[in-house]
Amino acid sequence: MRLLVKVQIPGTEGNAAIADGTLGSTIGSILADIKPEAVYFAEENGMRTAYVFINIQDASEIPAICEPWFLAFNAKVQLHPAMSLEDLKNAGPGIERAVAKYGRGARAAGA
């Protein structure tokens, strides 16, 4: 399953890692361990934020993805299932069933 892992590094911890010269190397080490498909960096809500796209086979992999961020930076980590365009195309039948059962037309007809 592909996940978007959003990592937010609090200012205090991020600033300390910059001051002691470890921010880049620590992030690099974590990313080398988890082997993401893609990574993007930005600011969100005043915090250094990484958007890490990773593919996992089993939920038991989640701690190995999250714990390094918690331990190194006291980071806030969120996991979101993510789809590629191909995944979205394959979701069509499920979406159509939901529309037929729960869409406005189905509710109006008393289904």
Image (spheres, rainbow, N blue to C red):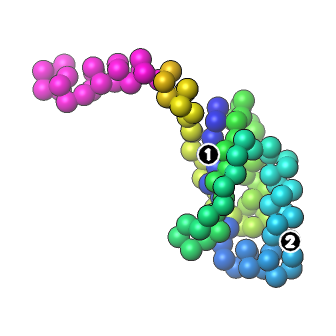
At x 65%, y 68%, the residue is 48
Residue 70: image location, x then y, percent:
73, 61
Q: Is residue 63 magenta?
A: no
Please state which of residues 19 and 77 is positioned toward the viewer in this rendering: 19
The range drawn in magenta is 91-111
Q: Which mark sits nearer the N-terminus, 2 or 1? A: 1
Mark 2–mark 1 distance (CA, rounded to whole Å): 24 Å
- Looking at the picture, does residue 40 appear above or below residue 58? below
At x 27%, y 21%, the residue is 101
- Whether residue 97 sits left or right of residue 18 in the image: it is left
Q: What type of secondary structure mainly makes up the magenta span?
A: helix
Residue where numbered disc 1 is placed: 4
Which mark is drawn over residue 22? 2
- Looking at the picture, does residue 92 appear above or below residue 11? above
Local SS, label 2: loop
Please state which of residues 34 and 67 is positioned toward the viewer in this rendering: 34
